Image: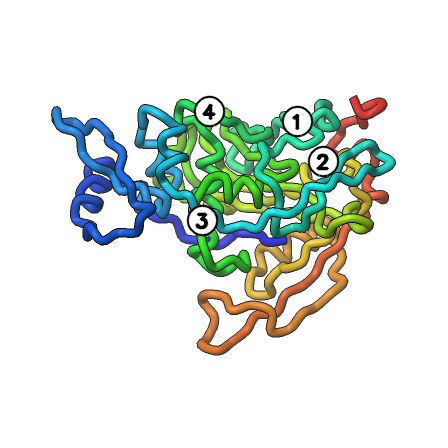
Amino acid sequence: MMMMLRTTCATPHPMRLIVRQNLNRPRSAPAAAHHFYHRSQTTRHEPIDAHYLQRNSYAALRQLRPTSYRWITEHISTASSTVTANPADHKHSSGAQRAFTTAYGGTPGDGKHNHHLLAHLIPHKSNLKDGRRVEVDFFRHSPNDIEEDEWFAGMALMNLVIREGRSWPFEEEFSSVDGWRGYFLSHTAFVVRALDNGMDAAKRNSSSQGEVLGCFYIKPNFPGRCSHVCNGGFITAPRFRGLGIGRLMGKVFLRAAKDLGYKSSYFNLVFESNPGSVNLWESLNFKRVATLENAARLEGLDEGELDTAFGYRYDLEKLPEDYLGIQPASDGK
């Protein structure tokens, strides 16, 4: 389990700046740097380096309206940075199906595995600390419109925390949507979506209705006989930190994991140098059950220093049936 609470966010690039920077990029860019075209404010089409776009925030991606989502997914990259596993299903007494995967690999999905078990819970509406209305919902996929496609939003946020290097163990960014889907959407995953226009946490920049403020997944931590123990990964968009998004995701995670049939949750890697994450899980009554010293080479530490990782567990069988004030579904419906 990894929790991003401290990343820095690049200022969203105006389209002219994106175009200018890409025109100045050397032509020896990687093979993944195919070009698609965006009509600028002039009458000519400007080439945009897709490799560069992948390494920018979702705010930058939202400024583009390419003619075909399918064209981009086929041309940005053919590489995948995750490992897929044999999808041999295992059936639990709850009726939930678990693919034979671990927390670090899986088959590309849509994040809606066993969604019918959560019909009473999702979408879950709530309010942030600043009063802004949000909902926790499944990822929305818009095959013909990258601006509305939350798969791209999720991958952009994931790559952002990988580049930041302080909260997740990955070093290589995801270079394809399918690769990211194999990791993040292989089972059940959610976004925190804004229902109103508003401002970011610093109240410096506006934020629009429909923007993805955070995301998280729920999936087995281990395969086979231990797949009733789930894992979660959480990302809060940097400019919305401090508004209670992490706590909202944590609470919905607990209720959704229980209703999906998991017996307990175990977070493998909660880094000591990330006190926001440590404090969050302890405030939600997760129990620290493991300490792994010299576990991670994280950015921001002294040269040669390795961070300590904690393991946190939650016994989901002890979670109240009406947690979050929602009664359990009858017969899983």
- The reply to whether residue 217 is in sight is yes
Q: What residue sits 35% from the left and 36% below the top?
A: 61
- Image check: 175 left or right of 135? left
- Which residue is under mark 3? 159
**Residue type at mark 3?**
Asn
Say above or below: 250 vs 312.
above
Callout 1 environment at 10 Å: few (<14), some (14 to 19), or many (20+)? some
**Residue type at mark 1?**
Ile
- Image check: 264 left or right of 308? right
Q: Secondary structure at mark 1?
A: loop
**C-beta proximity under 8 Å, tags 1 and 2:** yes
Q: What residue sits 36% from the left and 30% below the top?
A: 71
Of labels 1 and 3, the one closer to you: 3
* Separation of residues labelled 2 and 3 (CA atoms): 25 Å
Outermost residue, bottom side: 304
Q: Secondary structure at mark 2?
A: helix
Of labels 1 and 4, the one closer to you: 4
List x then y, in percent, for residue 115.
69, 28
**C-beta proximity under 8 Å, tags 2 and 3:** no
**Residue type at mark 2?**
Ala
Q: What residue sits 43% from the left and 26% below the top?
A: 148
- N-terminal label among 2 and 3: 3
Callout 4 environment at 10 Å: few (<14), some (14 to 19), or many (20+)? some
- N-terminal label among 1 and 4: 1
- N-terminal label among 4 and 3: 4
**C-beta proximity under 8 Å, tags 1 and 3:** no
Q: Secondary structure at mark 3?
A: helix
Q: What residue sits 57% from the left and 38% below the top?
A: 108
- Which residue is under mark 2? 256
- Which residue is under mark 1? 122
* Separation of residues labelled 4 and 2 (CA atoms): 25 Å
